[in-house]
Image: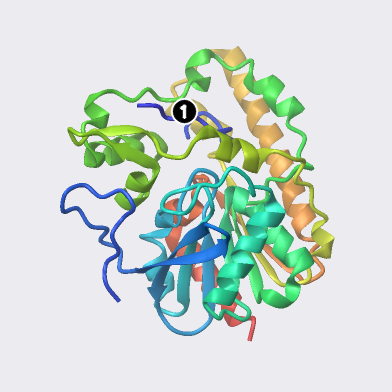
Amino acid sequence: MVVRTLRIVTILFLFQPGVSAQTSGHWQDPSHHRVIFVPVGEGISLEVLDWGGSGQPVVLLAGLGSTAHVFDDFAPKLATRCHVYGITRRGYGASSRPLSGYDEEQLANDDLRVFVALKLKTPVVAGHSVAGNELSQLGIHFPDRVAGLVYLDALNDGSDDYSDYDALTAKLPQRMRMPPVVSAADTKNFSAFQQWKTRTDGVIYPEAELRSKYRENADGSVGDEITPDFVSDSIMAGDHKHDYSQIKVPVLAFVGFPKPALEQIREGNITDPSEKEILEAVFGTYVGMTKNRIKRINSASGGARAVELWGASHFVFLSNADEVLRQIQIFIGGLH
């Protein structure tokens, strides 16, 4: 199988139940959601998950390479106080895979068309990772269409300068830079693959998310990724720079930080003085970049509050679900 590795910004370590787009025999997605397909263009429809609930509508947007099923475990917790939806953007999962339309302006327009189809007047929109580009588009250009924005470790922006960070990480020993290698035993079925992902990434991805991303071979083993490379490449093309001061709606931003350098050194049993020095420099550089991101989002004219999560996974809604849920509920409560 092919597991494509995206740029990693952490250090060292990385109704009725709906049926997943990729089902195996009688396997069913245990997450209680309704699956809707919403047309957003000629011959193009998006998979939308509806977890139900009442109160403020909340729309969840996945990060690069993910589908709305990545929220299968988190969304039901949020749905105890809100009506929660998730959008699988074009190119991924059960959504259409057209050859074009992957710039952030079009992706934000897709979101708006879903809002119209579902009669959502002013939802709170929460986006993970690259979905921050869509959030910024909505907050700057369509502030009357959203009640607030929640950035789930999604402040990476074209304004970031990675030159120093990249130069330092290139000096790390190869064993620290190489992604974990998956074995045939780890891909014999989706359950084994989920367990391997949990060991290597430190968070539990819903099985439906993995089944929406990877093909299932005839023998039940995990195959290649479903989405062609051009989709992610197209989404990442462009400078994606945003003037956060022009965001005219309230913002809640979760910011993930890696474990402190000394803790990483201890856990990794790093004894070489030069390796320690490089790791500490990498850590300090990344923290500095992240603090600059917080300064940028704090300029939002609609008001912003950043929540720092130290030692969190990039998937903060999985690694720090309780705190993320609590802060979102506080944020939504303050909108009324």
Give, as a three-letter code, the residue at label 1.
Answer: Arg
Question: Is 180 displayed left or right of 106 in the figure?
Answer: left
Q: Which quadrant, please, contains the N terminus?
A: top left
* Residue at the (53%, 33%) spot, across then down: 229
- Residue 73 in view in this figure: yes
How many labels sit on residues? 1
Label 1: few (<14), some or many (≥20) within 10 Å? few
In percent of the image, x 79 and y 52: which residue is there? 242
Task: State the residue in front, 173 or 37.
Answer: 37
Residue 154 sits above or below residue 7 on the image: below
In the rendered view, does 84 fall on the left or right side of 192?
right
At which x and y percent is residue 66?
47, 47
Give the residue at x 29% y 23%.
183
Q: Quadrant of residue 69?
A: bottom left
Question: Do we see residue 204 in this rendering?
Answer: no
66 relative position to 128: left or right: left
Q: Residue furthest front?
A: 42
Locate residue 3: give its quadrant: top left
> Whole-percent x and y of residue 186?
26, 30
Q: From this view, report whether residue 28 is shown above or below residue 222.
A: below
Front residue of 292/19: it is 19
Q: Find residue 31 and report its horizontal and vertical position in percent.
A: 30, 63
User: Residue at left 49%, top 60%?
Assistant: 46
Q: Is residue 275 above or below residue 198?
A: above
The picture places residue 152, in percent across and down from the top left corner, at 57, 56
Which residue is the site of mark 1? 266
| Frontmost residue, 270 versus 135 | 135
SS at circle 1: helix
Quarter holding the C terminus is: bottom right
